[in-house]
């Protein structure tokens, strides 16, 4: 079994930065990703990273502003979010799978965290 716990969300103003963390316990995951879900919308792919950290994926809406990274010595994945905008407001979820999976679809991942709220005011 594995467990994912997100942290780092909060209320910020447009243009500010936040860093989300996803602490992993109980297993080792090859594929890890971040998704987000705003009220009334479907869950959206944000970013993903492979085991070594050498391959990263980003959704079009966050490219150039968000950076994903992972520290396997700390069993933690990070999402650095810069230049935040009101449209980034959502619950952000960490996702993981033991296999190498297609990174951008929610159905690829077997494990999910509980989510952390990010609110960006204008």
Image (cartoon, rainbow, N blue to C red):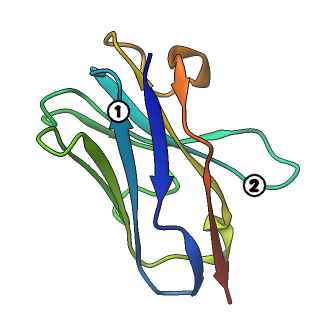
Compared with 53, 100 (above or below) is above
Quadrant in which the C terminus appears: bottom right
- Judging depth in this view, the residue of 86 and 90 nearest the camera is 90
Could you tell whether 42 is left or right of 112 in the image?
right
Q: Residue furthest right?
A: 40
Residue at the disc numbered 1: 25
- Judging depth in this view, the residue of 96 and 61 nearest the camera is 96
Between marks 2 and 1 in the image, the one whose residue lies nearer the viewer: 1
Could you tell whether 21 is left or right of 49 in the image?
right
Q: Position of residue 87 (x, y in %)?
A: 67, 68
Q: Residue at x 39, y 74 (%)?
A: 82
Q: Residue furthest top?
A: 99
Quadrant in which the N terminus appears: top left
Q: Position of residue 44 (x, y in %)?
A: 63, 41
Q: Secondary structure at mark 2?
A: loop
Among the 4 quarters of the image, the one containing residue 64: bottom left
Q: Position of residue 101 (x, y in %)?
A: 39, 13
Compared with 99, 29 (above or below) is below
Q: Position of residue 8 (x, y in %)?
A: 46, 67
Q: Secondary structure at mark 1?
A: strand
Specify few, some or many for label 2: CA neighbours under 10 Å numbering under 14, 14-19, or 20 or more: some
Among the 4 quarters of the image, the one containing residue 100: top left
Q: Residue at x 59, y 25 (%)?
A: 106
Query: In the image, which disc is placed on residue 38?
Result: 2
Compared with 3, 75 (above or below) is below
Spatial separation of the CA atoms under disc 2 and disc 1:
27 Å
- Judging depth in this view, the residue of 20 and 62 nearest the camera is 20
């Amino acid at each position: 079994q594995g467990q994912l716990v997100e942290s780092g969300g909060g209320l910020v103003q447009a243009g500010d930065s936040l860093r989300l963390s996803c602490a992993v316990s109980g297993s080792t995951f090859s594929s890890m990703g971040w998704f987000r879900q705003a009220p009334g919308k479907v869950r959206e792919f944000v970013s993903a990273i492979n085991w070594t950290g050498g391959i990263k994926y980003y959704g079009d809406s966050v490219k150039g502003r968000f950076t994903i990274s992972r520290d396997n010595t700390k069993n933690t994945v990070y999402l650095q979010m810069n230049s935040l905008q009101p449209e980034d407001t959502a619950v952000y979820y960490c996702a993981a799978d033991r296999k190498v999976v297609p990174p951008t679809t929610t159905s690829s991942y077997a494990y999910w965290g509980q989510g952390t709220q990010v609110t960006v005011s204008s």
